[in-house]
Amino acid sequence: MSSATSTRRDARRNHERLLAEARTLFAERGIDAPLDELATRAGVGAGTVYRHFPSRDALLRELYDQSIAMFHEMAPEIHSAPTGWRSIELLLERLSEWIAATPYLPELMRRVAEIDPHHRPGLAFADGLEKVIERAKAEGSLRSDVESSDLNVLINMLGSLGRFGGDYLPFWRRQLAIVLDGLRARPGLEPLPGPAQSFDDFDRMAHRQTR
């Protein structure tokens, strides 16, 4: 193995270690935690941190983009579920669980919106989410007045349980079961009050954009 190849491999290893430690550090202390502490946790010098991430914003942007990529990786399992209802279950379960385990995510979304107000990759999920909803409605398993923004809000509500820390994570499925029961179609349901917020408006609100 050439020295150049070894150097590149070490650099990739350091990069991934820094990202992994940043997730843990930010989950514990928020996205403004000292980067010197990140260096210490990753076992590298402060200079190595800044060679990989010239600024805190660069680190946050990469963590954000990795989060979006992870959502995309979940999509095939959700869309290939045997029934529309199972797709709904997987959607709420997978995304809520991940957000609960990533308590810094709302703060990260707001910061990236400040860094780049026009970067809104979440809009790419709108069509896929609509397909999941329409499939479940067509089979009669999802109540007919549920919209995509409703599911987004519920996912964020469930995910917000992560603020209580890891001690609560074994119990969050109770709330998931309650939410799923409320989404099921059944005879005699009272219509939901008022119209649903649009997906676009919710996405702007989640990122706290006013433009």
Image (tube, rainbow, N blue to C red):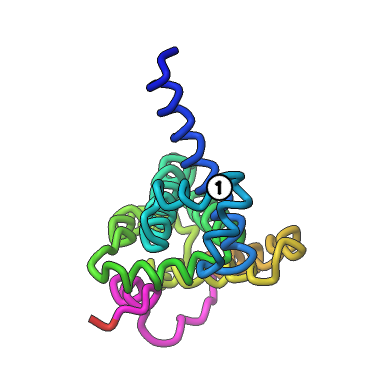
The quarter of the displayed image where residue 200 is located: bottom left
Q: Quadrant of the C terminus?
A: bottom left
Position of residue 50 measured from the top left corner of the image (x, y, whole percent): 42, 52
* Count of residue discs: 1
- The relative height of residue 140 versus residue 113 in the rendered view (above or below) is above
Of all residues, the one furthest to the bottom in this rendering is: 194
- In the rendered image, is residue 55 in sight? yes
Q: Depth check: 58 or 102 in front?
A: 58
- Residue 150 is left or right of residue 182, and the answer is left
Residue, x 54% and y 55% (percent of image)? Answer: 22
Position of residue 180 measured from the top left corner of the image (x, y, whole percent): 59, 64
- In the rendered image, is residue 96 in sight? no
Q: Which residue is mark 1?
A: 20
Q: Depth check: 141 or 128 in front?
A: 128
What secondary structure do most residues of the magenta stretch adopt? loop
Q: Is residue 200 magenta?
A: yes
Residue, x 33% and y 60% (percent of image)? Answer: 122
Q: Quadrant of the N terminus?
A: top left
Q: Which residues are magenta?
A: 187-209
Residue, x 45% and y 34% (percent of image)? Answer: 12
- Residue 110 is left or right of residue 16, and the answer is left
The quarter of the displayed image where residue 126 is located: bottom left
- The relative height of residue 65 versus residue 112 in the rendered view (above or below) is above
Q: Depth check: 186 or 96 in front?
A: 96
